[in-house]
Amino acid sequence: MECVKIFIVLILIFLFKYSSNSDDASDEKTEETIALQSLISDKTHLYKKPSVVIVSLIRNKAHTLPLFLTYLEEQDYPKDRISLWIVTDHNEDNSKEILEVWLRRARNFYHSIHYQHDDSEKLRRGETNMTHWPEERFLEIIRLKEDALIAARKAWADYIFFIDADVFLTSSASLSTLISLNRPIIAPMLSSEGLYSNFWCGMSSDYYYKRTDDYKKIRNYEMVGEFPVPMIHSSVLIDLNRFSSDLLTFNKTKLNSYHNQKFYDGPIDDIIIFAISANFSNTEMTISNSHAYGFILVPLDQDEPMTKDEQQLKNTKVSIINQHNEIHVVPELQKYVKYPNKSKLTFSDIYMINLKRRSERRVKMEQSFKELGIDYTYLEAVDGKTLTDEVLIQKGINLLPEYADPYHKRPMTMGEIGCFLSHHTIWQKMIEKGQEEVLVLEDDIKFEPYFNERSEQLLEEARAIGGWDLIYFGRKRLHENEEFLEKSENFVKVSYTYWTLGYALTLAGAKKLLAAEPLKRLLPVDEFLPIMFDQHPNDTWKMKYEKRNLVAWSVSPLLLYPTHYTGEDGYISDTEDSKQIQIDLANAASEALKGTINGNILNQVKHDPSEL
Protein backbone atom coordinates (compact mmCIF):
# COMPACT_ATOMS: atom_id res chain seq x y z
CA MET A 1 0.00 0.00 0.00
CA GLU A 2 2.86 2.38 0.85
CA CYS A 3 4.47 1.68 -2.56
CA VAL A 4 1.25 2.68 -4.32
CA LYS A 5 1.13 5.96 -2.33
CA ILE A 6 4.75 6.72 -3.17
CA PHE A 7 4.10 5.97 -6.86
CA ILE A 8 1.13 8.35 -6.93
CA VAL A 9 3.14 11.13 -5.29
CA LEU A 10 5.97 10.62 -7.83
CA ILE A 11 3.48 10.92 -10.71
CA LEU A 12 2.18 14.17 -9.20
CA ILE A 13 5.71 15.52 -8.93
CA PHE A 14 6.39 14.60 -12.55
CA LEU A 15 3.22 16.28 -13.79
CA PHE A 16 3.85 19.35 -11.64
CA LYS A 17 7.40 19.73 -12.89
CA TYR A 18 6.74 19.40 -16.61
CA SER A 19 3.40 21.18 -16.83
CA SER A 20 5.05 24.56 -16.16
CA ASN A 21 5.39 26.97 -19.11
CA SER A 22 8.39 28.63 -17.52
CA ASP A 23 11.88 27.72 -18.71
CA ASP A 24 13.19 28.40 -15.21
CA ALA A 25 10.63 26.02 -13.74
CA SER A 26 11.83 23.25 -16.04
CA ASP A 27 15.40 23.72 -14.87
CA GLU A 28 14.88 24.24 -11.16
CA LYS A 29 12.87 22.34 -8.56
CA THR A 30 10.18 24.34 -6.88
CA GLU A 31 9.91 24.50 -3.12
CA GLU A 32 6.82 22.30 -3.30
CA THR A 33 8.68 19.64 -5.30
CA ILE A 34 11.56 19.63 -2.86
CA ALA A 35 9.18 19.33 0.06
CA LEU A 36 7.34 16.40 -1.52
CA GLN A 37 10.55 14.58 -2.37
CA SER A 38 11.78 15.15 1.17
CA LEU A 39 8.60 13.56 2.51
CA ILE A 40 9.06 10.53 0.28
CA SER A 41 12.68 10.04 1.33
CA ASP A 42 11.62 9.86 4.97
CA LYS A 43 8.88 7.28 5.46
CA THR A 44 8.14 8.62 8.94
CA HIS A 45 6.55 11.64 7.24
CA LEU A 46 4.26 9.74 4.89
CA TYR A 47 1.43 10.46 7.30
CA LYS A 48 0.41 13.72 8.84
CA LYS A 49 0.62 14.16 12.59
CA PRO A 50 -2.66 13.70 14.47
CA SER A 51 -4.78 16.84 14.67
CA VAL A 52 -5.15 18.43 18.10
CA VAL A 53 -7.61 20.95 19.51
CA ILE A 54 -6.05 22.85 22.41
CA VAL A 55 -8.59 24.28 24.85
CA SER A 56 -7.87 26.94 27.45
CA LEU A 57 -10.35 28.86 29.61
CA ILE A 58 -8.70 32.02 30.89
CA ARG A 59 -9.70 34.45 33.61
CA ASN A 60 -7.56 37.02 35.47
CA LYS A 61 -4.29 35.48 34.31
CA ALA A 62 -2.49 38.54 32.99
CA HIS A 63 0.49 37.70 35.18
CA THR A 64 0.85 34.14 33.84
CA LEU A 65 -0.18 34.62 30.21
CA PRO A 66 3.14 35.86 28.76
CA LEU A 67 4.94 32.77 30.03
CA PHE A 68 2.04 30.36 29.46
CA LEU A 69 1.57 31.45 25.85
CA THR A 70 5.30 31.43 25.15
CA TYR A 71 5.66 27.82 26.27
CA LEU A 72 2.47 26.86 24.43
CA GLU A 73 3.82 28.38 21.22
CA GLU A 74 7.18 26.67 21.68
CA GLN A 75 5.72 23.17 21.64
CA ASP A 76 7.53 21.35 18.84
CA TYR A 77 4.30 19.89 17.45
CA PRO A 78 3.34 21.03 13.90
CA LYS A 79 1.18 24.09 14.38
CA ASP A 80 -0.79 23.48 11.19
CA ARG A 81 -2.13 20.38 12.96
CA ILE A 82 -3.27 22.40 15.98
CA SER A 83 -6.52 24.32 16.39
CA LEU A 84 -6.96 26.68 19.33
CA TRP A 85 -10.21 26.98 21.30
CA ILE A 86 -9.81 29.86 23.75
CA VAL A 87 -12.33 31.57 25.99
CA THR A 88 -11.71 34.47 28.35
CA ASP A 89 -14.34 36.20 30.47
CA HIS A 90 -15.06 38.16 33.66
CA ASN A 91 -11.56 39.63 33.81
CA GLU A 92 -10.50 42.33 36.23
CA ASP A 93 -7.05 42.60 34.65
CA ASN A 94 -5.78 42.92 31.06
CA SER A 95 -5.91 39.20 30.22
CA LYS A 96 -8.05 39.94 27.14
CA GLU A 97 -5.57 42.49 25.80
CA ILE A 98 -2.61 40.13 26.23
CA LEU A 99 -4.49 37.26 24.61
CA GLU A 100 -5.46 39.32 21.60
CA VAL A 101 -1.91 40.58 21.08
CA TRP A 102 -0.69 36.99 21.04
CA LEU A 103 -3.57 35.72 18.88
CA ARG A 104 -2.66 38.26 16.20
CA ARG A 105 0.76 36.64 16.16
CA ALA A 106 -0.57 33.07 16.45
CA ARG A 107 -3.09 33.26 13.61
CA ASN A 108 -0.18 33.09 11.16
CA PHE A 109 0.77 29.55 12.04
CA TYR A 110 -2.08 27.63 13.75
CA HIS A 111 -4.62 25.71 11.67
CA SER A 112 -7.59 27.58 13.14
CA ILE A 113 -8.49 29.71 16.14
CA HIS A 114 -11.82 29.83 17.96
CA TYR A 115 -11.80 32.80 20.33
CA GLN A 116 -14.61 34.19 22.45
CA HIS A 117 -14.58 36.78 25.21
CA ASP A 118 -16.94 38.53 27.58
CA ASP A 119 -15.75 41.11 30.08
CA SER A 120 -19.10 42.85 30.41
CA GLU A 121 -19.27 41.82 34.06
CA LYS A 122 -16.38 41.23 36.45
CA LEU A 123 -18.16 38.58 38.51
CA ARG A 124 -20.50 35.76 37.63
CA ARG A 125 -23.83 35.39 39.33
CA GLY A 126 -23.30 34.01 42.83
CA GLU A 127 -19.63 35.00 43.10
CA THR A 128 -18.37 37.19 45.93
CA ASN A 129 -14.87 37.64 44.45
CA MET A 130 -12.69 36.32 41.64
CA THR A 131 -11.47 33.30 43.65
CA HIS A 132 -14.93 32.26 44.84
CA TRP A 133 -16.32 29.05 43.29
CA PRO A 134 -20.12 28.87 43.76
CA GLU A 135 -22.14 26.24 41.91
CA GLU A 136 -22.97 28.74 39.15
CA ARG A 137 -19.29 29.07 38.30
CA PHE A 138 -18.80 25.31 38.07
CA LEU A 139 -21.84 25.03 35.80
CA GLU A 140 -20.45 27.69 33.46
CA ILE A 141 -17.04 25.99 33.29
CA ILE A 142 -18.76 22.66 32.63
CA ARG A 143 -20.76 24.21 29.78
CA LEU A 144 -17.66 25.75 28.18
CA LYS A 145 -15.60 22.56 28.41
CA GLU A 146 -18.47 20.49 27.06
CA ASP A 147 -18.85 22.91 24.15
CA ALA A 148 -15.15 22.53 23.35
CA LEU A 149 -15.36 18.74 23.54
CA ILE A 150 -18.34 18.67 21.17
CA ALA A 151 -16.62 21.07 18.77
CA ALA A 152 -13.49 18.89 18.65
CA ARG A 153 -15.58 15.80 17.90
CA LYS A 154 -17.46 17.60 15.13
CA ALA A 155 -14.14 18.73 13.63
CA TRP A 156 -12.96 15.09 13.58
CA ALA A 157 -9.96 16.05 15.72
CA ASP A 158 -7.75 13.17 16.77
CA TYR A 159 -7.01 14.67 20.17
CA ILE A 160 -8.27 17.38 22.48
CA PHE A 161 -5.87 18.93 24.98
CA PHE A 162 -7.32 20.87 27.92
CA ILE A 163 -4.73 23.13 29.56
CA ASP A 164 -5.04 25.80 32.25
CA ALA A 165 -3.29 29.15 31.93
CA ASP A 166 -1.23 28.57 35.07
CA VAL A 167 0.49 25.54 33.53
CA PHE A 168 3.96 26.05 32.05
CA LEU A 169 5.08 23.28 29.70
CA THR A 170 8.77 24.13 29.86
CA SER A 171 9.64 21.07 27.78
CA SER A 172 8.91 21.81 24.13
CA ALA A 173 8.42 18.07 23.60
CA SER A 174 5.53 17.81 26.08
CA LEU A 175 2.66 17.48 23.61
CA SER A 176 4.59 15.19 21.25
CA THR A 177 5.63 12.98 24.15
CA LEU A 178 2.12 12.64 25.52
CA ILE A 179 0.74 11.67 22.12
CA SER A 180 3.54 9.15 21.58
CA LEU A 181 2.61 7.38 24.83
CA ASN A 182 -0.67 6.33 23.16
CA ARG A 183 -2.96 6.44 26.19
CA PRO A 184 -6.72 7.18 26.07
CA ILE A 185 -6.46 9.98 28.66
CA ILE A 186 -3.09 11.19 29.90
CA ALA A 187 -1.61 14.12 31.81
CA PRO A 188 1.96 15.31 32.25
CA MET A 189 2.96 15.40 35.90
CA LEU A 190 3.62 19.02 36.80
CA SER A 191 5.80 20.35 39.62
CA SER A 192 4.83 23.12 42.01
CA GLU A 193 6.46 24.92 44.93
CA GLY A 194 5.22 22.16 47.23
CA LEU A 195 3.76 18.66 46.97
CA TYR A 196 0.77 19.82 44.93
CA SER A 197 0.41 18.42 41.43
CA ASN A 198 -2.27 17.80 38.81
CA PHE A 199 -3.31 14.26 39.77
CA TRP A 200 -4.78 12.18 42.57
CA CYS A 201 -3.74 8.66 43.44
CA GLY A 202 -6.86 8.03 45.49
CA MET A 203 -10.50 9.13 45.49
CA SER A 204 -12.83 8.72 48.46
CA SER A 205 -16.31 7.22 48.31
CA ASP A 206 -17.74 10.75 48.26
CA TYR A 207 -15.52 11.64 45.28
CA TYR A 208 -12.90 13.78 47.01
CA TYR A 209 -9.12 13.55 47.37
CA LYS A 210 -7.78 10.57 49.31
CA ARG A 211 -4.22 10.35 50.62
CA THR A 212 -2.14 7.43 49.38
CA ASP A 213 1.46 6.27 49.75
CA ASP A 214 2.02 6.28 45.99
CA TYR A 215 1.23 9.98 45.54
CA LYS A 216 4.48 11.21 47.08
CA LYS A 217 6.47 8.49 45.34
CA ILE A 218 5.20 9.60 41.95
CA ARG A 219 5.35 13.32 42.76
CA ASN A 220 8.96 13.02 44.03
CA TYR A 221 10.06 10.75 41.16
CA GLU A 222 10.69 7.79 43.45
CA MET A 223 8.45 5.91 41.01
CA VAL A 224 9.00 6.92 37.38
CA GLY A 225 6.86 6.04 34.40
CA GLU A 226 3.19 6.10 33.49
CA PHE A 227 0.66 5.21 36.17
CA PRO A 228 -3.12 4.66 36.20
CA VAL A 229 -4.80 7.14 38.55
CA PRO A 230 -8.41 8.08 39.35
CA MET A 231 -7.98 11.79 38.66
CA ILE A 232 -5.95 14.08 36.41
CA HIS A 233 -6.64 17.75 35.74
CA SER A 234 -5.29 21.12 34.55
CA SER A 235 -3.39 19.61 31.62
CA VAL A 236 -5.20 16.64 30.07
CA LEU A 237 -4.84 15.02 26.64
CA ILE A 238 -7.75 12.89 25.36
CA ASP A 239 -7.59 10.51 22.40
CA LEU A 240 -10.84 11.10 20.50
CA ASN A 241 -10.28 8.19 18.12
CA ARG A 242 -11.17 5.67 20.79
CA PHE A 243 -14.78 4.52 20.95
CA SER A 244 -14.89 5.02 24.71
CA SER A 245 -14.12 8.73 24.27
CA ASP A 246 -17.69 9.24 23.05
CA LEU A 247 -18.86 8.53 26.60
CA LEU A 248 -16.60 11.14 28.19
CA THR A 249 -18.33 14.24 29.51
CA PHE A 250 -18.13 17.08 32.00
CA ASN A 251 -21.92 17.20 32.30
CA LYS A 252 -23.58 15.39 35.21
CA THR A 253 -26.89 14.87 33.40
CA LYS A 254 -25.19 13.41 30.33
CA LEU A 255 -23.04 11.19 32.52
CA ASN A 256 -26.06 9.55 34.12
CA SER A 257 -27.88 9.23 30.80
CA TYR A 258 -24.91 7.38 29.29
CA HIS A 259 -24.83 4.77 32.06
CA ASN A 260 -28.14 3.23 33.06
CA GLN A 261 -26.59 0.80 35.52
CA LYS A 262 -24.56 3.47 37.33
CA PHE A 263 -25.55 6.74 38.91
CA TYR A 264 -23.39 9.70 39.90
CA ASP A 265 -24.73 11.75 42.80
CA GLY A 266 -21.54 13.62 43.65
CA PRO A 267 -20.57 17.29 43.54
CA ILE A 268 -21.03 19.57 40.56
CA ASP A 269 -17.36 19.87 39.71
CA ASP A 270 -15.98 19.62 36.17
CA ILE A 271 -12.85 17.62 36.97
CA ILE A 272 -14.64 15.16 39.26
CA ILE A 273 -17.51 14.54 36.82
CA PHE A 274 -15.02 13.99 34.00
CA ALA A 275 -12.99 11.55 36.12
CA ILE A 276 -16.15 9.59 36.96
CA SER A 277 -17.18 9.53 33.30
CA ALA A 278 -13.79 7.97 32.49
CA ASN A 279 -14.31 5.45 35.27
CA PHE A 280 -17.86 4.56 34.19
CA SER A 281 -16.71 4.05 30.58
CA ASN A 282 -13.66 1.97 31.61
CA THR A 283 -11.32 4.55 30.10
CA GLU A 284 -8.05 4.61 31.98
CA MET A 285 -6.56 7.90 33.17
CA THR A 286 -2.77 8.04 33.22
CA ILE A 287 -0.24 10.35 34.84
CA SER A 288 3.21 10.46 33.26
CA ASN A 289 6.39 11.52 35.06
CA SER A 290 8.88 9.82 32.73
CA HIS A 291 9.63 13.24 31.26
CA ALA A 292 10.21 16.61 32.94
CA TYR A 293 7.18 18.38 31.47
CA GLY A 294 6.87 21.61 33.45
CA PHE A 295 5.23 23.44 36.32
CA ILE A 296 1.86 24.39 37.76
CA LEU A 297 0.68 26.99 40.27
CA VAL A 298 -1.28 25.93 43.34
CA PRO A 299 -4.93 27.13 43.07
CA LEU A 300 -5.88 29.98 45.37
CA ASP A 301 -8.30 29.43 48.22
CA GLN A 302 -11.43 31.57 48.25
CA ASP A 303 -10.07 34.27 50.56
CA GLU A 304 -6.53 34.41 49.16
CA PRO A 305 -5.59 37.53 47.17
CA MET A 306 -4.27 37.52 43.62
CA THR A 307 -0.93 38.75 44.99
CA LYS A 308 -0.46 35.21 46.35
CA ASP A 309 -0.75 33.86 42.81
CA GLU A 310 1.75 36.44 41.60
CA GLN A 311 4.15 35.40 44.36
CA GLN A 312 3.76 31.76 43.31
CA LEU A 313 4.58 32.77 39.75
CA LYS A 314 7.76 34.44 40.97
CA ASN A 315 8.79 31.27 42.81
CA THR A 316 8.00 29.16 39.76
CA LYS A 317 9.99 31.37 37.41
CA VAL A 318 13.02 31.08 39.68
CA SER A 319 12.60 27.28 39.61
CA ILE A 320 12.42 27.36 35.82
CA ILE A 321 15.63 29.40 35.67
CA ASN A 322 17.34 26.93 37.97
CA GLN A 323 16.22 23.97 35.85
CA HIS A 324 16.62 25.46 32.37
CA ASN A 325 19.24 28.21 32.96
CA GLU A 326 17.02 30.88 31.44
CA ILE A 327 13.52 32.18 31.03
CA HIS A 328 12.16 34.16 28.13
CA VAL A 329 8.94 35.47 26.62
CA VAL A 330 7.96 36.04 22.98
CA PRO A 331 8.77 39.64 21.94
CA GLU A 332 5.17 40.86 21.62
CA LEU A 333 4.41 39.91 25.23
CA GLN A 334 7.56 41.15 26.96
CA LYS A 335 5.99 44.52 27.77
CA TYR A 336 3.39 42.75 29.92
CA VAL A 337 5.94 41.04 32.18
CA LYS A 338 6.23 42.71 35.58
CA TYR A 339 9.24 42.56 37.86
CA PRO A 340 9.35 43.45 41.57
CA ASN A 341 11.11 46.56 42.80
CA LYS A 342 14.74 45.95 43.76
CA SER A 343 15.56 45.44 47.42
CA LYS A 344 18.55 44.55 49.59
CA LEU A 345 16.18 42.68 51.95
CA THR A 346 17.16 45.09 54.77
CA PHE A 347 20.86 44.10 54.53
CA SER A 348 23.55 46.74 54.12
CA ASP A 349 24.52 44.88 50.96
CA ILE A 350 24.15 41.55 49.19
CA TYR A 351 27.30 40.18 47.57
CA MET A 352 27.32 37.57 44.82
CA ILE A 353 30.66 35.81 44.21
CA ASN A 354 31.28 34.62 40.66
CA LEU A 355 34.26 33.60 38.57
CA LYS A 356 34.57 35.75 35.47
CA ARG A 357 34.96 32.68 33.27
CA ARG A 358 31.71 31.23 34.62
CA SER A 359 29.58 33.77 32.78
CA GLU A 360 26.70 31.29 32.39
CA ARG A 361 26.36 31.15 36.18
CA ARG A 362 26.37 34.92 36.41
CA VAL A 363 23.63 35.20 33.78
CA LYS A 364 21.56 32.59 35.62
CA MET A 365 21.98 34.39 38.95
CA GLU A 366 21.19 37.76 37.39
CA GLN A 367 17.95 36.37 35.97
CA SER A 368 17.03 34.97 39.38
CA PHE A 369 17.83 38.30 41.05
CA LYS A 370 15.69 40.11 38.48
CA GLU A 371 12.71 37.83 39.14
CA LEU A 372 13.17 38.07 42.91
CA GLY A 373 13.83 41.81 42.91
CA ILE A 374 17.18 41.49 44.69
CA ASP A 375 19.59 44.42 44.54
CA TYR A 376 23.09 42.95 44.73
CA THR A 377 26.77 43.76 44.32
CA TYR A 378 28.84 41.62 41.98
CA LEU A 379 32.18 40.40 43.30
CA GLU A 380 34.53 38.87 40.76
CA ALA A 381 35.98 35.80 42.43
CA VAL A 382 39.70 35.17 42.69
CA ASP A 383 40.33 32.52 40.06
CA GLY A 384 42.46 29.62 41.26
CA LYS A 385 43.63 29.08 37.68
CA THR A 386 45.44 32.43 37.80
CA LEU A 387 47.18 31.68 41.10
CA THR A 388 50.69 30.27 41.27
CA ASP A 389 52.92 29.26 44.13
CA GLU A 390 54.94 32.41 43.51
CA VAL A 391 51.84 34.62 43.70
CA LEU A 392 50.87 33.10 47.03
CA ILE A 393 54.36 33.67 48.41
CA GLN A 394 54.24 37.29 47.23
CA LYS A 395 50.91 37.79 49.01
CA GLY A 396 52.35 36.34 52.20
CA ILE A 397 49.90 33.45 52.23
CA ASN A 398 50.94 30.50 54.36
CA LEU A 399 48.99 27.28 54.34
CA LEU A 400 48.11 25.31 57.41
CA PRO A 401 50.69 22.52 57.04
CA GLU A 402 48.57 20.01 58.90
CA TYR A 403 45.59 20.40 56.57
CA ALA A 404 44.34 17.61 54.32
CA ASP A 405 40.90 17.40 52.80
CA PRO A 406 38.82 15.18 55.13
CA TYR A 407 37.28 13.26 52.24
CA HIS A 408 39.89 13.15 49.48
CA LYS A 409 42.94 13.22 51.80
CA ARG A 410 44.67 15.80 49.63
CA PRO A 411 46.18 19.23 50.23
CA MET A 412 44.41 22.48 49.37
CA THR A 413 43.81 23.31 45.74
CA MET A 414 44.35 26.65 44.08
CA GLY A 415 40.59 26.79 43.56
CA GLU A 416 40.00 26.52 47.31
CA ILE A 417 42.53 29.27 47.92
CA GLY A 418 40.81 31.49 45.36
CA CYS A 419 37.46 30.77 47.01
CA PHE A 420 38.79 31.76 50.44
CA LEU A 421 40.34 34.95 49.10
CA SER A 422 37.00 35.90 47.51
CA HIS A 423 35.17 35.61 50.84
CA HIS A 424 38.08 37.34 52.57
CA THR A 425 37.70 40.29 50.18
CA ILE A 426 34.06 40.72 51.22
CA TRP A 427 34.98 40.69 54.92
CA GLN A 428 37.52 43.43 54.21
CA LYS A 429 34.98 45.47 52.23
CA MET A 430 32.53 45.28 55.12
CA ILE A 431 35.05 46.87 57.45
CA GLU A 432 36.18 49.46 54.90
CA LYS A 433 32.56 50.54 54.25
CA GLY A 434 31.26 50.04 57.79
CA GLN A 435 28.53 47.68 56.59
CA GLU A 436 26.62 46.35 59.59
CA GLU A 437 25.07 43.26 57.99
CA VAL A 438 25.61 41.67 54.59
CA LEU A 439 24.41 38.57 52.80
CA VAL A 440 27.11 36.59 50.99
CA LEU A 441 25.96 34.36 48.13
CA GLU A 442 27.89 32.00 45.90
CA ASP A 443 26.77 31.51 42.29
CA ASP A 444 25.80 27.83 42.34
CA ILE A 445 22.68 28.14 44.47
CA LYS A 446 18.94 27.77 44.07
CA PHE A 447 16.48 29.81 46.11
CA GLU A 448 13.70 28.28 48.15
CA PRO A 449 10.15 29.65 47.61
CA TYR A 450 9.39 32.97 49.30
CA PHE A 451 13.10 33.62 49.76
CA ASN A 452 12.74 37.40 50.07
CA GLU A 453 9.89 37.35 52.55
CA ARG A 454 11.43 34.64 54.70
CA SER A 455 14.84 36.36 54.67
CA GLU A 456 13.39 39.64 55.90
CA GLN A 457 11.30 37.94 58.58
CA LEU A 458 14.22 35.86 59.83
CA LEU A 459 16.58 38.81 59.85
CA GLU A 460 14.08 40.81 61.89
CA GLU A 461 13.82 37.96 64.38
CA ALA A 462 17.60 37.54 64.56
CA ARG A 463 18.02 41.23 65.33
CA ALA A 464 15.43 41.00 68.08
CA ILE A 465 17.25 38.07 69.69
CA GLY A 466 20.68 39.62 69.14
CA GLY A 467 24.18 38.37 69.81
CA TRP A 468 24.87 36.63 66.49
CA ASP A 469 27.81 37.05 64.13
CA LEU A 470 26.99 34.67 61.28
CA ILE A 471 23.81 32.92 60.11
CA TYR A 472 23.92 30.20 57.47
CA PHE A 473 21.19 30.45 54.82
CA GLY A 474 22.52 27.42 52.92
CA ARG A 475 24.98 24.71 53.94
CA LYS A 476 25.61 20.97 54.16
CA ARG A 477 24.59 19.95 57.65
CA LEU A 478 26.52 16.96 59.00
CA HIS A 479 24.56 16.44 62.23
CA GLU A 480 20.79 15.96 62.24
CA ASN A 481 19.88 16.86 65.80
CA GLU A 482 21.04 20.44 66.13
CA GLU A 483 19.65 22.36 69.07
CA PHE A 484 17.17 25.16 68.42
CA LEU A 485 17.77 28.50 70.09
CA GLU A 486 15.83 28.89 73.30
CA LYS A 487 13.85 31.83 71.95
CA SER A 488 13.27 30.64 68.40
CA GLU A 489 11.83 27.87 66.25
CA ASN A 490 13.62 29.19 63.17
CA PHE A 491 17.29 29.15 64.20
CA VAL A 492 19.58 26.34 65.35
CA LYS A 493 23.00 26.43 66.95
CA VAL A 494 25.38 25.34 64.24
CA SER A 495 27.42 22.17 64.47
CA TYR A 496 30.20 21.16 62.06
CA THR A 497 29.08 22.25 58.59
CA TYR A 498 30.29 22.09 54.99
CA TRP A 499 29.77 24.64 52.21
CA THR A 500 29.35 28.40 52.17
CA LEU A 501 26.43 28.67 49.73
CA GLY A 502 25.04 31.69 51.51
CA TYR A 503 25.37 33.33 54.91
CA ALA A 504 24.52 36.54 56.70
CA LEU A 505 27.45 38.21 58.44
CA THR A 506 27.63 41.13 60.86
CA LEU A 507 30.37 43.73 60.98
CA ALA A 508 31.44 42.34 64.35
CA GLY A 509 31.62 38.88 62.79
CA ALA A 510 33.77 40.14 59.91
CA LYS A 511 36.16 41.73 62.39
CA LYS A 512 36.48 38.45 64.30
CA LEU A 513 37.22 36.54 61.10
CA LEU A 514 39.92 38.97 59.97
CA ALA A 515 41.41 39.27 63.46
CA ALA A 516 42.17 35.54 63.31
CA GLU A 517 44.62 36.28 60.46
CA PRO A 518 43.57 33.24 58.44
CA LEU A 519 45.93 33.96 55.54
CA LYS A 520 48.84 33.07 57.81
CA ARG A 521 47.53 29.52 58.31
CA LEU A 522 45.12 29.04 55.46
CA LEU A 523 42.62 26.23 54.99
CA PRO A 524 39.34 26.12 52.99
CA VAL A 525 36.74 28.67 54.03
CA ASP A 526 34.14 26.03 54.92
CA GLU A 527 36.67 24.47 57.32
CA PHE A 528 37.76 27.83 58.70
CA LEU A 529 34.28 28.99 59.71
CA PRO A 530 33.48 25.91 61.89
CA ILE A 531 36.84 26.42 63.60
CA MET A 532 35.91 30.01 64.37
CA PHE A 533 32.61 29.00 66.01
CA ASP A 534 34.47 26.16 67.78
CA GLN A 535 32.59 23.25 66.26
CA HIS A 536 35.35 21.67 64.19
CA PRO A 537 36.17 18.04 65.03
CA ASN A 538 39.89 18.35 64.18
CA ASP A 539 41.60 19.54 67.36
CA THR A 540 44.97 19.92 65.63
CA TRP A 541 43.57 22.47 63.21
CA LYS A 542 41.50 24.22 65.85
CA MET A 543 44.46 24.80 68.12
CA LYS A 544 46.09 26.98 65.46
CA TYR A 545 43.34 29.54 66.14
CA GLU A 546 43.25 30.63 69.75
CA LYS A 547 40.15 32.87 69.61
CA ARG A 548 37.21 30.79 68.44
CA ASN A 549 34.36 33.01 69.58
CA LEU A 550 32.28 33.52 66.43
CA VAL A 551 28.57 33.16 67.29
CA ALA A 552 26.99 31.18 64.45
CA TRP A 553 23.43 30.06 63.82
CA SER A 554 21.63 28.53 60.90
CA VAL A 555 18.13 29.07 59.62
CA SER A 556 16.00 25.93 59.79
CA PRO A 557 14.71 24.98 57.30
CA LEU A 558 17.36 26.30 54.92
CA LEU A 559 16.67 29.03 52.35
CA LEU A 560 19.35 27.99 49.84
CA TYR A 561 20.49 24.73 48.28
CA PRO A 562 23.13 23.87 45.67
CA THR A 563 22.01 23.76 42.05
CA HIS A 564 23.80 20.44 41.59
CA TYR A 565 25.24 17.79 43.84
CA THR A 566 28.45 15.85 43.23
CA GLY A 567 27.99 13.32 40.44
CA GLU A 568 24.86 14.91 38.96
CA ASP A 569 24.73 16.04 35.34
CA GLY A 570 25.88 19.65 35.18
CA TYR A 571 27.94 19.49 38.38
CA ILE A 572 31.12 21.55 38.12
CA SER A 573 33.64 22.24 40.87
CA ASP A 574 36.15 25.05 40.53
CA THR A 575 37.73 24.10 43.86
CA GLU A 576 38.06 20.32 43.54
CA ASP A 577 39.11 20.34 39.89
CA SER A 578 42.07 22.66 40.18
CA LYS A 579 45.78 22.49 40.80
CA GLN A 580 46.93 21.29 44.22
CA ILE A 581 49.35 23.55 46.09
CA GLN A 582 53.06 22.90 46.17
CA ILE A 583 54.11 25.43 48.81
CA ASP A 584 56.53 24.58 51.58
CA LEU A 585 56.49 20.84 50.90
CA ALA A 586 59.71 20.38 52.79
CA ASN A 587 58.26 21.87 55.97
CA ALA A 588 55.10 19.82 55.59
CA ALA A 589 57.07 16.64 55.16
CA SER A 590 59.30 17.53 58.09
CA GLU A 591 56.30 18.17 60.35
CA ALA A 592 54.71 14.94 59.22
CA LEU A 593 57.76 12.91 60.11
CA LYS A 594 57.72 14.48 63.57
CA GLY A 595 54.26 13.04 64.04
CA THR A 596 52.41 16.34 64.30
CA ILE A 597 50.25 15.65 61.25
CA ASN A 598 47.50 13.06 61.38
CA GLY A 599 48.25 9.53 60.28
CA ASN A 600 46.61 9.73 56.89
CA ILE A 601 48.72 12.70 55.87
CA LEU A 602 51.82 11.10 57.34
CA ASN A 603 51.27 8.12 55.07
CA GLN A 604 50.92 10.41 52.05
CA VAL A 605 54.18 12.18 52.84
CA LYS A 606 56.03 8.94 53.38
CA HIS A 607 54.85 7.52 50.06
CA ASP A 608 54.86 10.61 47.86
CA PRO A 609 55.52 14.10 49.26
CA SER A 610 54.48 15.60 45.90
CA GLU A 611 50.87 14.69 46.70
CA LEU A 612 50.71 17.06 49.65
Image (cartoon, rainbow, N blue to C red):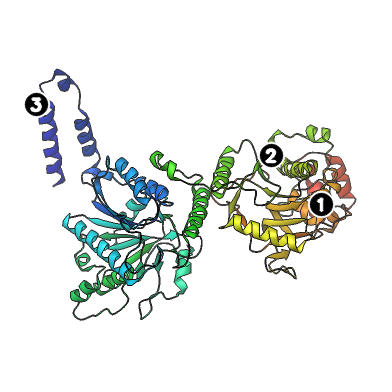
Q: Secondary structure at mark 3?
A: loop
Of the pair 398 and 216, the residue shown nearer to us: 216
- What element does badge 1 sit on? helix
Query: Quick one: SS at disc 2?
Result: loop
Front in this rendered view, residue 432 or 365: 432
Q: Where residue 292 appears, x then y in whole percent? A: 43, 55
Q: Nearer the viewer, mark 2 or mark 1?
A: 1
Task: Kindly report the distance in space between the C-alpha atoms of the residues bearing marks 3 and 2.
Answer: 69 Å
Count residues near mark 1 (Cα–Cα under 10 Å), then give few for <14, some for 14-19, many for 20+. some
User: How dense is the environment of label 3, judged by Cα within 10 Å: few (below 14), some, or many (20 and up)?
Assistant: few
From mark 2 to mark 1, how far is it between C-alphas?
A: 23 Å
Between label 3 and label 2, give the one nearer the viewer. Answer: 2
Tell me the amino acid under the disc marked 2: Ala
Closest to the camera, between mark 3 and mark 1, is 1
Q: Which residue is mark 3?
A: 19
Q: Is residue 128 left or right of residue 425?
A: left
Amino acid carrying label 3: it is: Ser
The answer to whether residue 409 shows anywhere in this view is no
Q: Which mark is residue 34?
A: none
Q: Residue furthest front?
A: 120
Q: Which residue is mark 1?
A: 508
